Amino acid sequence: MKKLFFVCLILVICITSVFALDSYIGGYVDYTFETGQRKGTFLFPFEYSISKSSIGFGVTGTEYFTDSFGLSYKVCGAMLVSNTEADIKQDISKEPLIFNTALDFLYRYKFSKMFALEAGGGLSYSMTTDADSGISYTVHTLDINLKVGMLATIKKDFALSAGVNMATPVLTKPIFSSDTGKATYDLSVTSFKIGPYVALLYKF
């Protein structure tokens, strides 16, 4: 899933950049909060609440192929800053980095030459991998995204983007891997994610 999503993302970026009217690329930081329920069956049925927050940082960009419509993408890493499961605060000191990538269709409304509204939606993919005693554990998650923000041109070739991302998972797949093979189990996550972001972009 990771390789497929990543290859598709690269192809979309390469193709759209050729025909883009405006192109932006830069770095960004976000803070995401997630709350919801997790349930499934692993030896026995389970269900419990989740509440966690994370800080993400990485590369983001936008390709506008008309004056109003375009594609936004990001590739980033995120680290947990808090995690509560079943009302019990978890130790996050050894939590692995979360890989995340996203692709959104965007609509841009220009208020002036300096300010514009950006809004849209799409899909994101995240992966968390950990290992213990010779067994690796990977969780693949596919989300539906919504995004709204402001784009401010601060100089001719630079812009500042700030807004909020919202998401909910549509697919969660955990996989155990060891010398004897791979295994998975039923897992369903019903949650809502919201996170403000800010990005410094170069226009080309």
Image (tube, rainbow, N blue to C red):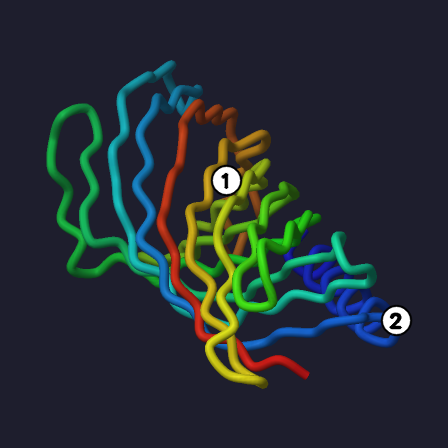
Q: Nearer the viewer, residue 31 or 196?
A: 196
- Seen in the picture, residue 131 relative to 23 is either above or below; the reply is above
Q: Position of residue 188 (x, y in %)?
A: 48, 24
Residue 161's label in the rendered image is none
CA neighbours of label 1 inside 10 A, class few (<14), some (14 to 19), many (20+): some
In percent of width and height, residue 41 lies at: 43, 20
Q: Which residue carries the number 2 mark?
A: 19
Identify which amino acid the numbered label 2 is placed on.
Answer: Phe
Q: Nearer the observer, disc 1 or disc 2?
A: 2
Q: Amino acid at mark 1?
A: Pro
- The reply to whether residue 181 is visible in this rendering is no
- Residue at horizontal 60%, vertical 67%? 113
Element class at badge 2:
helix
> x%, y% of residue 82?
18, 47
- Could you classify mark 2 by the number of other residues whose Cα lies within 10 Å: few (under 14), some (14-19), or many (20 or more)? few
Is 199 displayed left or right of 181 in the figure? left
Q: Where 90 falls versus 154 (above or below)?
A: above
- On the picture, is 5 further left or further right than 54? right
Q: Nearer the viewer, residue 63 or 154?
A: 154
Q: Quadrant of residue 75?
A: bottom right
Circle 1 SS class: strand
Q: Identify whether 7 is placed above or below 144.
A: below
Give the labeled residue for mark 1.
174
The residue sitting at 43% across, 20% down in the picture is 40
Badges 1 and 2: C-beta atoms under 8 Å apart?
A: no
